[in-house]
Image: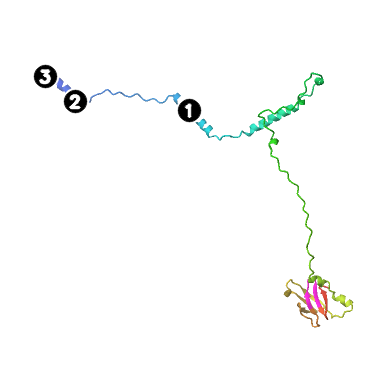
Amino acid sequence: MSFILDALKKAEAERNRRIAPVLMDARVAPPRRGLPAWAWALGGVLLANLLVLGWLLLREPGTPAPAGTVTASAASAGANNSGAATAGPESPGAGAPGASPPAGAGAASPAAPGTAPPPDAIRPALPVARPPVARTAPPSTASPRPRTDIDSDLQLPALHELRLAGVQLPDLVLNLHVYDPAPAHRSVMLNGIRLREGEYTPNGVKVERITPAGVVLEAAGRRFRLDAGG
């Protein structure tokens, strides 16, 4: 009887072992930790050094010094020169034998190395402008103005002058005087008759030329002028 019970227990245990899942020991990996703080600090220092090195390499060579440095050097040089010029007066015992000569009597000491020269010393010399040379104008060789017909017309005797001289001429009155640079537009009115250059009055007086001042007439082979408004 006990043998049968043992067999049943073994069969039941075998069946349960086949059905139940097999439990296996699984090892869980510990969580991975981040980098320590010193590693981050070291990386930041290395990155800063790389940035500074790159800036130095990219910087242009021969960068001129700031203007403030040159100004400070010139100011220090001026202060040194003014201090040497304002040295104390010579002591009364300077003329005694064995006394050392004054500092100003000796040769001027050479300029200290590195001292910038004053700004006036480095200015380029300006070119000297030559005074302008006066040119004498050549003597005028213009020929005298040729004598025009108007000048010759002004030298003709007037109508009233010939009458005073006893020359018999017809009575003429200049009623209208029109002068234009174009001869075709010139005209006069003598004794109420309108005439142009080259035309005759009823009593045989020829209108030879109409001038700006009047008219030149010809009668009995004699030329004379009759002024406008005269």
Residue 179 image offset from top left, x and y in percent: 76, 72
| Sequence-wise first label, 1 or 2 | 2
* Amino acid type, mark 2: Arg
The label on residue 169 is none
Does the CB distance between marks 1 and 2 fall below 8 Å? no
| Sequence-wise first label, 1 or 3 | 3
Q: Magenta segment: does it hold 108? A: no
Horizontal side, residue 51 vs residue 7: left or right: right
Disc 3 to disc 2, C-alpha distance: 21 Å
Figure quadrant of the C terminus: bottom right
Tag 3, which secondary structure? helix
Q: Quadrant of residue 177?
A: bottom right
Q: Which residue is mark 2?
A: 18
Horizontal side, residue 33 vs residue 124: left or right: left
Tag 2, which secondary structure? helix
The residue sitting at 17% across, 23% down in the picture is 14
Residue 46 image offset from top left, x and y in percent: 48, 28
Q: Which residue is mark 1?
A: 46
Q: Which residue is mark 3?
A: 4
Q: Quadrant of residue 204?
A: bottom right
Residue 90 image offset from top left, x and y in percent: 79, 23
Tag 1, which secondary structure? helix
Start and end of the magenta stretch? Answer: 207-217
Residue 163 image offset from top left, x and y in percent: 88, 77
* Amino acid type, mark 1: Leu
